[in-house]
Image (cartoon, rainbow, N blue to C red):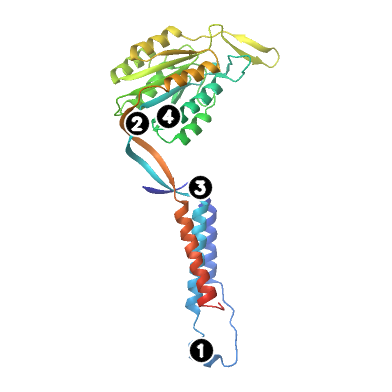
């Protein structure tokens, strides 16, 4: 368990300011000196030796400001990698972000395919509390956005931030995207490993790994692939700034997606509109769960309360010393 600061960049301002203030107080600040009649008599009686008290109060104040700086930086405990038993299956989501995903399929719901896919993927993630999930995106290249994790907040944020153009989007490297997702599931010690492959296009050759090779790899590793093909037989629509809404043909390779699902023990679904997409994810959500041990990456636990109570206790000590024990300082 490590201590982590979510806003560590604030130290670039707070720490130099605190250090400069401490240095000024220790080296340059001079406390006022007052001369009174009978000062020597008072000093001999032991009432004038208060320098150490002032230094102690100054140090207490400095520690208070330091704790405040730590609170501003948002302290967290981080369990970087731990193993826990969960009831669930290991799932990788491979999402197509090629240019054709900007098309919409319903004249009554003109959200693009990628926006619908993102929203339903987030909804699916929210429902899978005990399932480690990883994210892969692909276009004319493939990128692993997130390893398998139970951190649903991070997953939802990463999916919500997916945009067409994050990687080369002029093409669909379906096999390479599959292989990237399979690699995330390869070393998982789980009885059930699932890949949900979502695309609306035809594979664009030449790929680093073709779909047939990736399918064979999934078979060898016992990974079940559910394929989701987006778009109806009639195609979709695009909005042209001068021509308005215009129909566009769909290039979905249904036989290939059916073959991938059949060979790996999965199932092919066709999402002709946003309602279909939701129904498909709901059906996949009913998959059988199994107990497994999985790696959890970067689980964060807020440490705010500990630092806050430390600050309050130190503030109470300073106020007690200043106003009750050492009045007049």
Question: Mark 1 highlights which residue?
Answer: 43
First in sequence: mark 2 or mark 1? Answer: 1
- Tell me the distance, in whole angstroms, between the alpha carbons under discs 3 and 4: 29 Å
SS type, badge 4:
loop
Pointer 2 and pointer 3: residues touching (CB < 8 Å)? no
- On the image, the x and y values in percent for residue 88 come to 36, 29
- Tell me the distance, in whole angstroms, between the alpha carbons under discs 2 and 1: 74 Å
- Tell me the distance, in whole angstroms, between the alpha carbons under discs 2 and 3: 33 Å
- Tell me the distance, in whole angstroms, between the alpha carbons under discs 4 and 1: 74 Å
Q: Is residue 225 visible?
A: yes
Question: Mark 3 highlights which residue?
Answer: 7
First in sequence: mark 4 or mark 1? Answer: 1
SS type, badge 1:
helix
Q: Is residue 208 visible?
A: no
SS type, badge 2:
strand
Question: Mark 2 highlights which residue?
Answer: 87
- Between circles 2 and 3, the one closer to the viewer is 2
- Tell me the distance, in whole angstroms, between the alpha carbons under discs 2 and 4: 10 Å
Pointer 4 and pointer 1: residues touching (CB < 8 Å)? no
Pointer 2 and pointer 1: residues touching (CB < 8 Å)? no
- On the image, the x and y values in percent for residue 145 come to 45, 30
Q: Any mark on residue 128, and which?
A: 4
Give the vertical position of 254 relative to 297 (above or below). above
Identity of the residue drawn at 47% across and 36% down: 153
- Tell me the distance, in whole angstroms, between the alpha carbons under discs 1 and 3: 50 Å
């Amino acid at each position: 368990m490590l201590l982590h600061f979510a806003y560590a960049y604030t130290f670039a301002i707070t720490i130099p300011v605190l250090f400069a203030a401490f240095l000024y107080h220790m080296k340059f600040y001079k406390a006022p000196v007052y001369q009174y009649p009978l000062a020597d008599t008072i000093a001999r009686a032991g009432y004038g030796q208060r320098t150490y008290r002032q230094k102690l109060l100054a140090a207490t104040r400095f520690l208070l400001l330091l704790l405040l700086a730590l609170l501003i930086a948002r302290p967290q405990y981080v369990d970087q990698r731990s193993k826990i038993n969960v009831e669930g299956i290991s799932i990788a989501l491979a999402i197509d972000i090629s240019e054709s995903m900007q098309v919409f399929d319903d004249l009554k719901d003109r959200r693009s395919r990628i926006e619908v896919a993102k929203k339903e993927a987030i909804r699916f993630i929210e429902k899978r509390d005990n399932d480690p999930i990883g994210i892969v995106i692909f276009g004319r290249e493939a990128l692993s956005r997130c390893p398998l994790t139970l951190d649903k907040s991070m997953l939802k944020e990463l999916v919500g931030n997916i945009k067409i153009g994050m990687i080369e989007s002029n093409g669909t490297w379906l096999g390479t995207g599959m292989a990237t997702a399979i690699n995330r599931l390869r070393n998982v010690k789980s009885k059930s490993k699932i890949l949900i492959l979502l695309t609306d296009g035809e594979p664009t050759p030449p790929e680093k790994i073709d779909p047939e090779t990736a399918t064979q790899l999934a078979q060898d590793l016992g990974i079940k692939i559910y394929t989701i093909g987006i778009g109806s037989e009639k195609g979709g629509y695009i909005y042209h700034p001068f021509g308005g809404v215009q129909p566009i043909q769909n290039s979905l390779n249904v036989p290939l997606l059916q073959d991938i699902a059949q060979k790996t023990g999965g199932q092919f679904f066709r999402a002709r509109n946003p309602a279909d997409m939701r129904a498909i994810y709901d059906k996949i959500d009913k998959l059988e769960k199994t107990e497994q041990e999985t790696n959890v990456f970067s689980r964060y636990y807020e440490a705010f309360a500990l630092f806050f109570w430390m600050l309050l206790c130190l503030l109470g000590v300073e106020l007690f010393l200043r106003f009750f024990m050492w009045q007049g300082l």
